Amino acid sequence: MNVIAVSNQKGGCGKTTTAINLAASLASLGRRTLLIDLDPQAHATFGLGFRGEPQRLSMYNVLTEQEGKRQSFLESVIVSVSACFDLAPSHVLLSTIEQEFTTKDESIQRLRELLSSLSFPYDYVVIDCPPSLGFLTFNALRAAETVIVPIELSSFSLMGVGKLLSMIELLKVKLQHTPRVFALPTMIDMRTRFSRRMMDEIRGAFGEHVLNSAIRQTISIRESQAAGRPVVSLDPKSKGAIDYLVLAQEIANKLPSAAASQIEAPPAVTPADRLKDFSFRAMGAREVHVVGDFNNWRVSTNSLLWQKEEGVWQKKVHLGPGRYRYKFVVDGRWTTDPRNQEIEPNPYGGVDSVLEVD
């Protein structure tokens, strides 16, 4: 699992936009991706269409939960955005968390410990950090192996980077942890002399650690923000979508997933699709998959359920209207859904579970 923190204490540099669209683009490449919104402003949560739900569990509940329950809390707050793409949402209460944990040195390890104990395998975890250098950002940097610093082409955006690099140096000294740092130029317009000069300054500051990808200033990205959808989903042929897909591919090449060669492209999601919640109880199982007409009966990384709690496995699948046959595969053993009484014979002498999606 590759953990990537997207951070810059300077606001307005495309930090949250990058976190959303990098995560969505990695998912569109078939990589299972989790976006964690650690910004109390919850812009990434709102930017993915999760609005007006003040009672929703969030990362605040996860980080403040008692020892031993945080893992199950993290898995319970995660919501599905699209195929291969999940979100752990934020809440304004995160703005109070620093006061709750300032006296606990071990608290900066919380996010790292949570991610290491997840029962569901993600290829990439992208963390949207707040535009500050406090407790939450420190947690994200401690958990991350890679830090992406979006830098809008202005001197103010570049000025904020120094303190972030100082915090990373502090991690190295105190915790012997040194994440890789990459600069990402954002909102660029290379037709102007000023932009070209600022690009030279960024390369001077970061050298070979400037990503080859760069994000142009385009209307499609603003439209996707207003629509509450990633640009790769709203307008996949736009310049903004292409820029973030190129970035995702560069990141995938630099940080290859161990399972990347086994991952197939996720099915396209349409507005008519519905989320079907598959769950199966299997105490002591190592792996549980769900296969059927909707995935050509293929056992793969995309068919894997996650263990929400001990012995309870779960997966949400986007399905269009229609009738589907399916089965669960528990450690290689194929079985029907015990919670579904609708079955029908198959050509091989057995039976399959059946579901209807309106």
Image (cartoon, helix red, strand yellow):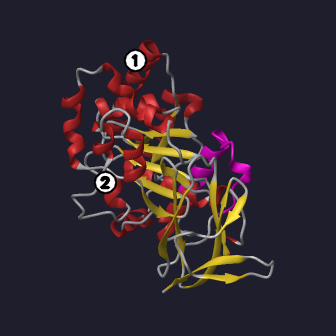
What is the spatial separation of the Cα atoms under label 1 and label 2, in whole angstroms? 28 Å
- Is residue 255 magenta-colored? yes
Q: Nearer the viewer, residue 72 or 266?
A: 72
Q: What secondary structure is found at the residue carrying circle 1?
A: helix
Relative vertical location of residue 210 with respect to residue 310 in this rendering, above or below:
above
Q: Nearer the viewer, residue 7 or 12?
A: 7
- In this picture, which residue range is highlighted in magenta? 244-265
Relative vertical location of residue 227 with respect to residue 308 in this rendering, above or below:
below
Q: Is residue 284 left or right of residue 105?
A: right
Relative vertical location of residue 181 with respect to residue 299 in this rendering, above or below:
above
Question: Quarter of the image holding residue 127?
Answer: top left
The three-letter amino acid code for the residue at tag 1 is Leu
Q: Nearer the viewer, residue 233 or 303?
A: 303
Q: Nearer the viewer, residue 247 or 67?
A: 67
Image quadrant containing the N terminus:
top right
Residue hosting label 1: 170
Q: How many numbered dots are placed on residues in this image?
A: 2
